[in-house]
Image (cartoon, helix red, strand yellow):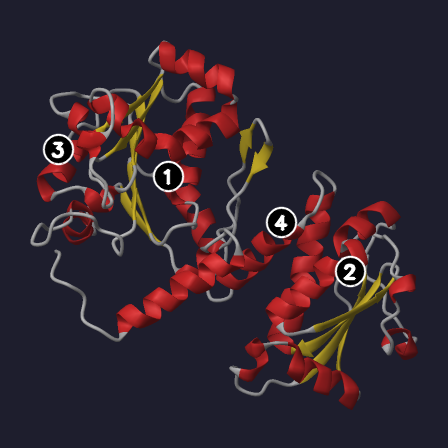
Amino acid sequence: MSESLTDDSLFNDRVADDRMADAPSAMTTESSPTESSLAESSLAESTEFRATQSPQPTVQLRFQLSPHDNERLSNLVGSFDAHLRLIERRLGVEINHRGAEFAVIGASPAAEQARAVLDGLYQSSAQEPIDAERVDLFLSAAGAADDEPNPAEDIVIRTQRGLLRGRGARQVRYLHAIADCVLSFGIGPAGTGKTYLAVASAVDALERGLVQRIVLVRPAVEAGEKLGFLPGDLAQKIDPYLRPMYDALYEMMGFDKVTKLIERQVIEVAPLAFMRGRTLNESFVILDEAQNTTIEQMKMFLTRIGFGSKAVVTGDITQIDLPRGITSGLRDAIEVLREVDAVSFTFFQARDVVRHPLVMRIVQAYEAREAHRPLPNRG
């Protein structure tokens, strides 16, 4: 239930002593233009975000978060209001609060976004503690959802560490595509959750009995390294390159369970070369780093899909390690399969990165440079 606040002076000063712990749930109330020139000047200095935007009317959103829970609100605002300061810097707003009563001052879209982030963080605080990483995830999700509404229903995946949902509209659509299509492509920069969500979907399908095994595949192409100098046979040489998928499995199922399933060949992790001549029935197959496949390898992999199987292909076409002059199988597949039924493509962007905020800025910086010079002829 929303409650309007009438004491305007309540928000004029930020007093750290008065910030106690309460909890956000049901929210919005009154939105009115602020008359405080002090708030406007501090807002203009608070972040580069404001400097790069066209002028927006400044508003003050006032709302009360309920039900009242001091411990959860303390978790929400963080030590010395660190979480609130992080939201302020990222969105270019000013946040004041006393107990459960909040005021957000800023440009209308950013203020609404901050209110939504606070509400979302509260909802999650009932199940798990809030830290800076979780605040970053919610902020990234809010930014990614600006121009694309989420599908009507979230897909929730149960893992050993708890419930897993998509962060932002593209991740949610990606999970829907994996669930609904026989073949799904997840294409975009590092840190957008392409492989992690694909592995999570595979684990969920296996535990619900929808498939009989999981096959994780990766091409044996070195990113500037030489496999020949590593000890062991081909499988042992490529094992370090498959580590990200192992790590995701361990996180979702536990080390002991994954080890047993690998021994029983319920989970198979293999280089792409080992797929030739096979037909994979009732399997969930994931091809990671697909940008490093050739056209022939991609065609070979896609034709391995058998009855009752599902395949997910992930990759980043800006990080191709193939020799010059060889066309990437992933780029070719995008052109060839775009209009084929039961095939979906999800294209992630830098704003969808859910790692440290610096990673998103790094990706954006590289994208900006590449946009101003011709790409090398690598297919």
Q: How far, Cα to Cα, is label 1 from label 2? A: 39 Å
Q: Are marks 3 and 4 in contact (CB under 8 Å)?
A: no
Determine whether 373 is above or below 71 in the image. below
Q: Is residue 120 above or below residue 179?
A: below
Q: Position of residue 36 (x, y in %)?
A: 79, 87
Q: Gap in Å between the C-alphas at discs 3 and 1? A: 21 Å
Who comes first in sequence, dot 1 or dot 2?
2
What's under tag 4, amino acid-wise? Answer: Arg
Q: Upstream in the sequence, badge 3 or badge 4? A: 4
> Which residue has dot 1 on it?
178
Q: Position of residue 211 (x, y in %)?
A: 36, 21
Q: Residues within 10 Å of mark 2 (few under 14, many from 20)?
A: some
Specify whether residue 25 is in view.
Answer: no
Question: Residue at position x 60%, y 74% from top?
Answer: 109
Q: Earlier in the sequence, mark 2 or mark 4?
A: 2
Of tags 3 and 1, which is closer to the observer? Answer: 3
Identify residue for label 3: 300
Categorize mark 3 by other alpha carbons within 10 Å: few (<14), some (14-19), many (20+): some
| Amino acid under disc 2 | Asp
> Residue under circle 2?
81
Q: CA distance from mark 1 to mark 4?
A: 25 Å
Given this view, does label 2 or label 3 mark the residue nearer the observer?
2
Residue for badge 4: 134
Name the quadrant of the N terminus. bottom right
Q: Amino acid at mark 1?
A: Ile
Helix, strand, or loop for circle 2? helix
Percent x, y of residue 320: 22, 51
Q: Is residue 338 visible?
A: yes
